[in-house]
Image: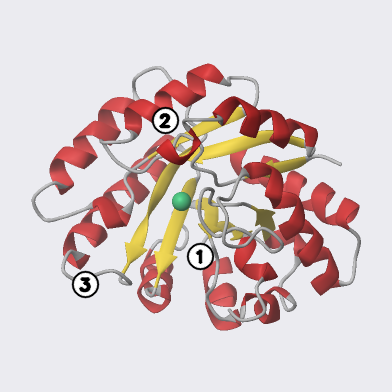
Amino acid sequence: MTLCDTHSHIFDEAFDADRAEVVERARQAGLDRIILPAIDCESHPRLLQTLEQYPDICRGAMGVHPTSLTADNVEAELAEVARLLDCGVEWVAIGEIGLDYYWSREHVEAQHHALRTQLDWAVERGLPVIIHTRDAWDDMTTLLEEYTGCGLRGVMHAFCGTIEHYNRIRHTGEWVFGIGGVVTYKKGGVAEVVAQMSLQDLVVETDAPYLTPVPYRGRRNEPAYVVHTAHRIAEILGTDITNVAAQTRTNTTRIFGV
Ligand SMILES: [Zn+2]
């Protein structure tokens, strides 16, 4: 059984004390790849350093996260993403990028500007995207519909939209949907939606250090725990974990080439 954690921030300070052990536990759990999506200028150096330290298992995505953006910093953040896209690292995607209305709607304009700019870069470069959406599923779906036919591909990370969002987004490009620890929670509604999704459209992720799956909920998340998410998906879809691992691993290669 081989798994890929398609979304993990193990460059975060939360892993400074034991990053090597975390990577080793991921290997032992059957992971052959961990994709690290960028956050912002402040954390890009740590991302680059982690990619350098674990070149056999870690792959990086470059982009700026919506919650890091303000009207004042958006151009500087985008300029740094543009610079790092050409710094010689073989990025597997542009991300994470997106819309997040949960914390504040104050910088929605900056978020939209950065998202469209980075989607355009992805189209130009033929790179997939890693998209973050929180409390903004309607706006995200409508925006992606504008890009229909442009050749976008990527992952809708931490998917928690409705089945209608899933069906509309699927038609706008070549998408997979990232399922993480939330699917193991009793409340959250993700399990009900996953039950209606095709395994061919799913990839697994942790979003470490956040969104820890049961039975470790409440503790720091780490890539090895993606096994619990795969197990829960197998339960929901009435199949076995080997099948979930094989199919989600194939889907990951189809989108990211890793
Ligand atoms: Zn993330």
Disc 3 from disc 1: Cα separation: 25 Å
Q: Which mark is residue 172?
A: 1
Is 158 displayed left or right of 103 in the figure? Answer: right
Q: Please give the name of the residue rendered at 52% of the width and 34% of the height, measured from the top-left corner.
A: 92
Q: Secondary structure at mark 2?
A: helix
Characterize the local packing of mark 3: few (<14), some (14-19) or many (20 or more) Cα atoms within 10 angstroms.
few
Residue 85 in view here: no
**Percent x, y for residue 131?**
45, 56
Q: Residue 123 at what x, y percent from top left?
A: 41, 44
- Quadrant assignment, res 4: top right
Name the residue rendered at 66%, 69% in the picture.
183
For the residues labelled 2 and 3, say whether their Cβ atoms are less than 8 Å apart. no
Q: Secondary structure at mark 3?
A: loop
Residue 218 vs residue 71: left or right?
right
Instruction: Mark 1: give few (<14), some (14-19) or many (20+) Cα within 10 Å.
Output: many
Mark 2 highlights which residue? 47
Query: In terms of sequence position, does the residue under pointer 1 or pointer 2 come before the other?
Result: 2
Q: Secondary structure at mark 1?
A: loop
In the image, residue 120 above or below residue 192: above
Colour basis: secondary structure
Question: Residue under circle 3?
Answer: 105
Q: Amino acid at mark 2?
A: Leu
* Mark 1 lies within 8 Å of ligand 1 (Cβ measured): no
